[in-house]
Image: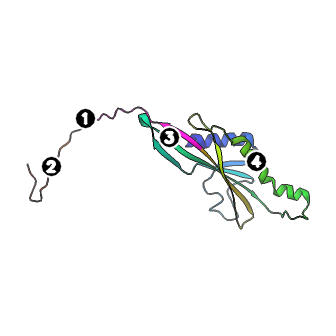
Amino acid sequence: MTEELLAAQNYIMQKVPVLHVDEDWGQLDYYTNQFPVKFPCCLIDIPAVVWASKQNKAQQGDAELVLTVAAQKLTNTSGKAPLPQKQQAYAIHGYIKSLHDALHHYNLTSRCGRLVRSRWQRIKRDDGIQEFKVVYKFVVNDIAESNTGEVTGLTLQLEVDNGIGLDT
């Protein structure tokens, strides 16, 4: 799925250039207070594909592209907070909308169907990071290279042990 991940990364960087875009390998999960990522960010992953066999060794997979959109939220957004402070704090929602406008019904590669948003979820954290997961479903086709199934140059020798000794 490398081709699809790179296609997603390049497309997002073109359409929402303010975001740091990278593959999600746990940057927000395994590091405390020293995240190896710049904010705001969009981390991308295709965590699983469920494959089904088709004709002629082809397979079709149901896949999900998961976008983790995150930003540091260091200020409050209370009713009495200054408007510029609120706008900065709510900017992540604009990034999510820009991502959706760009990605909804987009084909990552020629072997993929269109992306369709299926889920959006806020992730609660205790470290000042505002995080959302946005999930897009798509279909991917994989056609195996031709293989005749023919085996050549194989010799098989079988010996049977009946418990008393080898039959000859």
Can you tell which of label 3 and label 1 is closer to the viewer?
Answer: 3
Q: Which residue is mark 1?
A: 153
User: Residue 13 appears in which quarter of the rendering?
Assistant: top right
For badge 2, the amino acid type reads Glu
Magenta highlight range: 138-154
For badge 3, the amino acid type reads Gln
- SS for dot 4: helix
Q: For marks 3 and 1, give the CA distance.
A: 33 Å
Q: Which residue is mark 2?
A: 159
State which tag comes first along the sequence, 3 or 1. 3
166 over 140 or under it: above or below: below
- Looking at the image, residue 80 sits to the left or right of residue 13; the answer is right
Can you tell which of label 3 and label 2 is closer to the viewer?
Answer: 3
For badge 1, the amino acid type reads Gly
Tags 1 and 4 touching, CB below 8 Å: no
**Quarter of the image that includes the N terminus:** top right
How many numbered circles are shown?
4
- Residue farthest to the bottom, as pictured: 126
Q: Horizontal and vertical percent for residue 20?
A: 72, 49
Q: For marks 3 and 2, give the CA distance.
A: 42 Å
Can you tell which of label 1 and label 4 is closer to the viewer?
Answer: 4
Q: Which residue is mark 4?
A: 97
Q: Which residue is mark 3?
A: 60
Q: Horizontal and vertical percent for residue 32?
A: 67, 65
State which tag comes first along the sequence, 3 or 4. 3
46 over 55 or under it: above or below: below
